[in-house]
């Protein structure tokens, strides 16, 4: 059974003072006993993220495997977290855990090649259209470029939704292969970037923020609720009073638009 019952509000906290002291001690000593205590404290986050991710994946992808992948992300988050950055660890860890799960899913390459190609075709059509129009393209306009009816385009978006679920967390390398800036990640504070890399990273952030602000309102709401409020697609559908499949389509279109914007930026036509 997929563990959607794990919610962040059910994770017990240390008191603020105890938590801060624990992080200070670990920063100074790197004591494995303190690390293990932190892992124990925050391990429910892994189940929470794995449950949320699994809800949007085929049944062939095992929930327990996602938990295993997410543990690596939790360890990574604990090692790289800096309490001086004034970001809550839970917020930081969710991004790292989700990223670790998606990294392993990409390695599995479970999405059929034909579906990936169709997703690329849609992304290319959106990039060309929106660069020309200077505004978000409508479904009808995208469908026309692809030679599809609006109904067929809607079916296509449903088919490629699984590829969009994975794309938000791996968009851009900033400075070197170990530091990435993603659309869904705005809280990273990497150490050791040289000035040129830092400038590049900030420029990418600016482009991402601008691209998100230019999304149609419903697509923007879906991204905010999914990636920042950590709601499932089903929960978002209940809030917006539409079906889960409709939310999935809105999410997919938002990701495709953002990828198209970033591709345009890379090619110098943003």
Image (cartoon, rainbow, N blue to C red):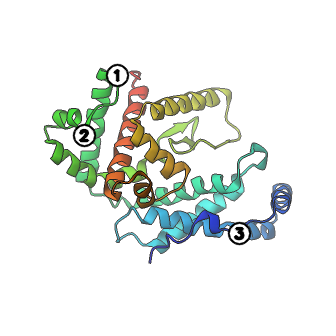
For the N terminus, which image quadrant? bottom left
Q: Residue furthest front?
A: 241
CA–CA distance between discs 2 and 1? 20 Å
Name the spot of residue 180 as percent of width and height, x first. 55, 42
Do the numbered discs 1 and 3 sit on residues whose CB atoms are within 8 Å? no
The residue pinned by badge 1 equals 134
| Residue under the point 83% across and 61% down | 22
Q: Tag 1's secondary structure?
A: loop
The residue pinned by badge 3 equals 12
Q: Is residue 268 visible?
A: yes
Q: Is residue 71 visible?
A: no
Label located before the other in sequence (3 or 2): 3
**Badge 1: how crowded within 10 Å, few (<14), some, or many (20+)?**
few
Rendered image: mark on residue 121: 2
Q: Tag 3's secondary structure?
A: loop
| Residue under the point 42% across and 52% down | 166
| Residue under the point 48% across and 52% down | 226
Location of residue 132 with respect to 148 vertically, above or below:
above
Q: Quadrant of residue 135?
A: top left
Name the spot of residue 60 as percent of width and height, x first. 35, 71
Q: Residue furthest bottom?
A: 1
Name the spot of residue 120 as percent of width and height, x first. 29, 42
From the viewer's perspective, tell me whether residue 158 is left or right of residue 263: left
Disc number lying in front (2 or 1)? 1
């Amino acid at each position: 059974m997929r563990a959607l019952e794990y919610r962040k509000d059910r994770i017990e906290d240390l008191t603020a003072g105890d938590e801060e002291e624990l992080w200070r001690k670990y920063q100074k000593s790197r004591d494995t006993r303190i690390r293990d205590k932190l892992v124990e404290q925050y391990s429910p986050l892994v189940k929470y993220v794995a449950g949320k991710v699994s809800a949007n994946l085929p049944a062939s992808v095992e929930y327990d495997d996602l938990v295993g992948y997410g543990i690596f992300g939790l360890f990574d988050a604990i090692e790289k977290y800096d309490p001086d950055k004034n970001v809550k660890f839970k917020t930081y860890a969710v991004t790292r855990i989700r990223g670790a799960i998606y990294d392993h899913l990409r390695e599995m390459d479970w999405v059929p090649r034909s579906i990936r190609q169709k997703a690329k075709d849609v992304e290319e059509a959106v990039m060309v259209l929106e660069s020309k129009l200077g505004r978000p393209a409508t479904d009808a306009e995208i469908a026309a470029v692809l030679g599809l009816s609006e109904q067929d385009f809607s079916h296509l978006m449903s088919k490629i939704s699984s590829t969009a679920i994975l794309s938000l967390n791996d968009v851009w390398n900033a400075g070197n292969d170990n530091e990435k800036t993603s659309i869904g990640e705005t809280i990273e504070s990497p150490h050791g970037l040289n000035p040129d890399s830092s400038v590049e990273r900030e420029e990418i952030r600016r482009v991402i923020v601008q691209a998100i602000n230019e999304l149609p309102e419903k697509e923007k709401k879906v991204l905010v609720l999914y990636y920042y409020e950590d709601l499932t697609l089903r929960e978002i559908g209940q809030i917006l009073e539409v079906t889960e499949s409709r939310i999935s389509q809105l999410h997919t279109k938002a990701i495709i638009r953002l990828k198209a914007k970033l591709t345009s930026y890379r090619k110098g036509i943003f």
